[in-house]
Image (spheres, grey):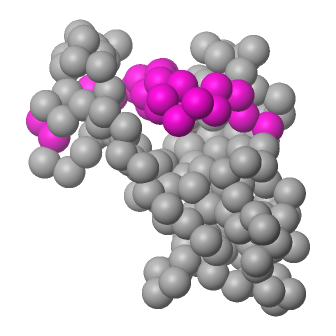
């Protein structure tokens, strides 16, 4: 029986989830040329990892805790749940923490750096393609960077409230 089959009928039940820490290669460099003191990216998978994966990223303060899980409330639990818009009966949701890691000294990290770290992590967990990438705000900018650099690894893209580059009009819309 898969993890998705074990979920009860209630749509917003806490999801089965597990964390994965992926060490980035020692030679991983940011676009700025800097190296990370702690070259790692932290992921959390929700639901059955055998199902197609949907990466989810939110604003700059969002992290890998995207759905409800045991005693933790996810920041997008209304969307990511059994029967939700990202249905954990059909998909495995993947949340990730943005670089830099706590205590990191790197000063300039681009959305493309985030996308490259995520792509490397997907290779390490042997899931090189995404059924979709859903990103909002800064997470949407990371999703756009991922789509630009790794289009062949992405089936669908959904970007909410994010621009491909800074512009005064984007600030005015907020």
Q: Quadrant of residue 150?
A: top right
Between residue 174 and residue 37, name the one nearer to us. 37
Please indicate whether residue 114 sits to the left or right of residue 30 in the image. Answer: right
Please indicate whether residue 22 sits to the left or right of residue 156 in the image. Answer: left
Does residue 98 appear anywhere in the picture?
yes
Between residue 145 and residue 48, name the one nearer to us. 48
Residue 35 lies in magenta, yes or no?
A: no
Rendering coords of residue 39 (x, y %)? 25, 31
Residue drawn where x is 47% and y is 87% of the image = 71
Question: Residue lying farthest front?
Answer: 1
Between residue 43 and residue 3, name the one nearer to us. 3
> Is 161 above or below relative to 168?
below
Rendering coords of residue 76 (x, y %)? 63, 68
Does residue 58 appear anywhere in the picture?
no
Region rendered in magenta = 104-131
Residue drawn where x is 84% and y is 65% of the image = 89
Please indicate whether residue 134 sits to the left or right of residue 121 in the image. Answer: right
Between residue 160 and residue 17, name the one nearer to us. 17
Rendering coords of residue 130 (x, y %)? 72, 34
Residue 122 lies in magenta, yes or no?
A: yes
Q: How many marks on residues? A: 0
Rendering coords of residue 103 (x, y %)? 13, 48
> Is 5 above or below relative to 151?
below
Please indicate whether residue 169 sits to the left or right of residue 65 in the image. Answer: right
Residue drawn where x is 22% and y is 18% of the image = 26
């Amino acid at each position: 029986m898969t993890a998705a089959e074990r979920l009860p009928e209630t749509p917003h039940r806490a999801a089965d989830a597990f964390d994965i820490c992926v060490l980035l290669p020692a030679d991983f460099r940011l676009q700025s040329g800097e190296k990370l003191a702690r070259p790692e990216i932290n992921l959390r998978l929700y639901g059955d990892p055998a199902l197609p994966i949907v990466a989810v990223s939110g604003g700059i303060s969002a992290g890998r805790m995207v759905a409800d899980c045991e005693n933790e409330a996810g920041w997008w639990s209304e969307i990511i749940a059994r029967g939700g818009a990202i249905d954990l009966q059909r998909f495995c949701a993947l949340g990730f923490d943005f670089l830099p890691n706590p205590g990191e000294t790197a000063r300039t990290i681009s959305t493309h750096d985030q996308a490259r770290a995520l792509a490397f992590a997907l290779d390490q967990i042997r899931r090189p393609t995404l059924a979709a990438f859903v990103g909002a705000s800064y997470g949407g900018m990371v999703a756009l960077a991922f789509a630009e650099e790794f289009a062949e690894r992405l089936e669908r893209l959904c970007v909410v409230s994010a621009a491909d580059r800074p512009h005064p009009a984007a600030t005015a819309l907020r």
